[in-house]
Image (tube, rainbow, N blue to C red):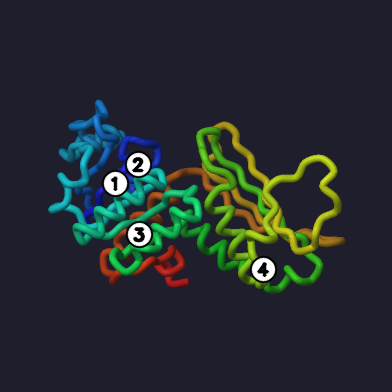
Amino acid sequence: MTRIAIVGVAGRMGRTLVNAVQQDDNATLAGGIVEPGSSLVGADIGELAGVGKLDVAAMDSLEDLAADVEVLIDFTTPQVTLANLAFCAEHGKRIVIGTTGLNDEELGALDGYRDRVPMVFAPNMSVGVNLTLKLLETAAKALGDEGYDIEVIEAHHRHKVDAPSGTALKMGEVVAESLDRSLKEHGVFAREGQCGPRDPKEIGFATVRAGDIVGEHTVMFATEGERIEITHKASSRMTFAKGAVRAARWVAGQANGRYSMQDVLGL
């Protein structure tokens, strides 16, 4: 049984992760972390998640869990994630990171732990999304240099704070790498006014933020006479949570290193 602690256990994703761990026969919930000083410190995390009393109290310090936990699952903020990586390095723990919105400096800091911490870092833990990434790699190699324009369209709920989504950026990176292009050079993230005709090598992005959309991503390959669209739609956060728990069970048996969901799934 992999002993898992969830950071940000009182949030929307945190509560879903509690449910996912409870549904997994090979994992057990060893703890949950809330913000320091939160009024929820001491609350039963099962009751917070709506799954009933689990006799596991919410805490505001990882130090209190150091002896009981094998793997942290972290869907928080870049600053919190980096602090949790430092904790894992100090205490010999593993971590699954679903945090998005890291800038280049923060990504560099995260990568600096690859020789000290076994970690799975992925912008999307969904099995379906990671299969979609493989499909995009194949499609890009077959179509991208044959006159097909490439656009990435994503939609999420009104509360999401970063744009484009980490998943959309990962999709763009997979396409760009398959075509020997640089997303930094060829990614176009805004169009307004007289922006001129489209550069054939552009990889365009469009972002929607509305309502309670869990997550929708489409990559379009369009040319004169036809359009191919590869789409993934998530209707529940549970798909991300189950993937994260699967990653936690997998990384519990790995050596130090930075891994992706492609590694977890053997893709």
In terms of secondary structure, where does tag 4 sit? loop
In terms of secondary structure, where does tag 2 sit? helix
Q: Which amino acid does label 3 sit on?
A: Arg
| Disc on the earlier residue, 1 or 4 | 1
Picture layout, residue 133 above or below residue 75: below
* Disc 1 and disc 2 in contact, CB within 8 angstroms: yes
Q: Name the residue under label 1.
A: 6
Q: Name the residue under label 2.
A: 14
Q: Is residue 41 left or right of residue 195?
A: left
Q: Which residue corresponds to the image point at 29% horizontal and 35% vertical from the top-left?
A: 35
Give the Cα distance between marks 3 and 2.
15 Å
Q: What residue type is labelled 2?
A: Gly
Closest to the camera, between mark 4 and mark 3, is 4
| Disc on the earlier residue, 2 or 4 | 2
* Residue 258 x, y percent position in the rendering: 38, 66
In terms of secondary structure, where does tag 3 sit? helix
Give the Cα distance between marks 1 and 2.
7 Å
Give the Cα distance between marks 4 and 3.
32 Å
Q: Which amino acid does label 4 sit on?
A: Arg
In terms of secondary structure, where does tag 1 sit? strand
